[in-house]
Image (cartoon, rainbow, N blue to C red):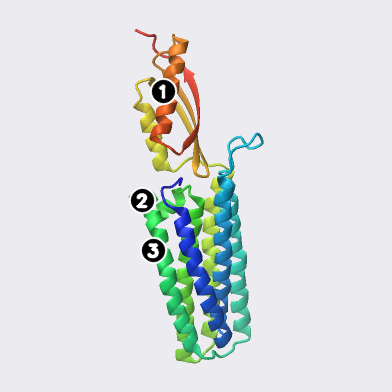
């Protein structure tokens, strides 16, 4: 994986948790009539669909290159990740806001509220397991960076999306539980409506943040800054290269394209220079297996001794 974390593992954990939670929430929403519970049910169902789309995107990204797509289909995962962010915004966020406004204008008392509390506690526990699995994969990729720095710099779109979804789901469940408890304690169903609206706003904010990050990958972005620095240091340390003039990297899903402009020590002997360029390219790909394409533009340097 491009960022070092196992995205498939995180997606499967999230899919299993969200499916179980959606069923439990749906039953509780039907019995209690809670708007916050209904919003959370739709949110979990949407998340299940989103995770299936991410798995589809990962599968398409592994398709071999063709004459029409000579650099492969790696960036297909960015399209599906962006689509998931849009769905999180529209299906999850907008529906929750709509349902909250409806409940605010037409408040209804909760029925058998203990169902809602029990399901929400179960859902929080299940979502916490999914979040823990996601964070384990994130920790493999982020190194010493904070979560926010990793989120801004990661090139692993599907893991960014799963992290955003899990975070939104966990916080949304806490909001829903708080709304139900406040409604029961005060007897005022307006708190249920407020909780539903808060869930919608939360989903919209996180969806927008995720969409902004994935958009950069979709239109073409360099590799993770940590990997960029490692490749730069590797090339500068090669004996064949007198000076690294310019380095361009491009993230293609889970693979990387590298373009190198360098001044070579040996430039007078054309055949020898070509052999040294080949050595650098092979060593680069061996050191960084994610590098699939390497384009090398040499420039003359010192004459051979």
Q: Which residue is mark 2?
A: 145
View extreme (right): residue: 68
Q: Are marks 3 and 2 in contact (CB under 8 Å)?
A: no
Q: Quadrant of residue 284?
A: top left
- Residue 273 locus on image (x, y percent): 44, 15
- Mark 1 or mark 3: which comes first in sequence? 3
Mark 2 and mark 1: Cα distance apart in space: 33 Å
Q: Secondary structure at mark 1?
A: helix
Q: Is residue 247 above or below residue 216?
A: above
Q: Nearer the viewer, residue 173 or 13?
A: 13
Please name the residue shown 57% across and 70% down the image. Answer: 45
- Residue 2 locus on image (x, y percent): 46, 45
Q: Secondary structure at mark 2?
A: loop
Q: Which class describes the residues within 10 Å of circle 2: few (<14), some (14-19), or many (20+)?
A: few
Q: Quadrant of residue 268?
A: top left
Q: Which mark is residue 155?
A: none
Examine the rendering and report whether any part of residue 179 can be seen. yes
Q: Is residue 233 above or below residue 159?
A: above
Please name the residue shown 43% across and 79% down the image. Answer: 121
- Residue 158 locus on image (x, y percent): 51, 54
Q: Which residue is mark 1?
A: 279
Q: Which mark is residue 132?
A: 3
């Amino acid at each position: 994986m491009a960022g070092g974390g196992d995205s498939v593992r995180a997606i499967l954990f999230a899919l299993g948790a969200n499916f179980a939670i959606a069923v439990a929430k749906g039953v509780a929403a039907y019995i209690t009539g809670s708007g916050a519970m209904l919003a959370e049910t739709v949110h979990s169902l949407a998340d299940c669909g989103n995770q299936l789309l991410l798995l589809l995107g990962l599968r398409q990204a592994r398709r071999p290159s063709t004459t029409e797509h000579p650099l492969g289909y790696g960036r297909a995962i960015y399209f599906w990740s962006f689509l998931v962010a849009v769905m999180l915004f529209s299906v999850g966020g907008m529906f929750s806001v709509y349902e909250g406004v409806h409940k605010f204008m037409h408040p209804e008392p909760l029925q058998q509220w203990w169902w809602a509390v029990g399901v929400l506690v179960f859902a929080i526990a299940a979502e916490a397991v999914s979040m823990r699995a996601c964070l384990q994969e994130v920790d493999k990729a982020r190194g010493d960076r904070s979560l926010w720095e990793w989120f801004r710099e990661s090139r692993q779109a599907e893991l960014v999306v799963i992290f955003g979804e899990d975070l939104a789901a966990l916080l949304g469940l806490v909001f829903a539980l708080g709304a139900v408890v406040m409604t029961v304690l005060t007897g005022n169903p307006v708190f249920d409506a407020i909780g539903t609206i808060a869930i919608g706003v939360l989903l919209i904010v996180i969806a927008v943040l995720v969409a902004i990050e994935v958009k950069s990958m979709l239109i073409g972005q360099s590799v993770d800054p940590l990997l960029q620095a490692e490749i730069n240091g590797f090339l500068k340390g090669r004996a064949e290269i007198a000076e690294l003039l310019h380095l361009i990297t491009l993230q293609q899903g889970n693979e990387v394209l590298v373009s190198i402009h360098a001044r070579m020590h040996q430039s007078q002997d054309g055949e020898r220079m070509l052999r040294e360029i080949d050595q650098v390219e092979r060593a680069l790909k061996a050191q960084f297996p994610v590098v699939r394409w390497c384009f090398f533009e040499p420039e003359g340097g010192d004459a051979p001794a």
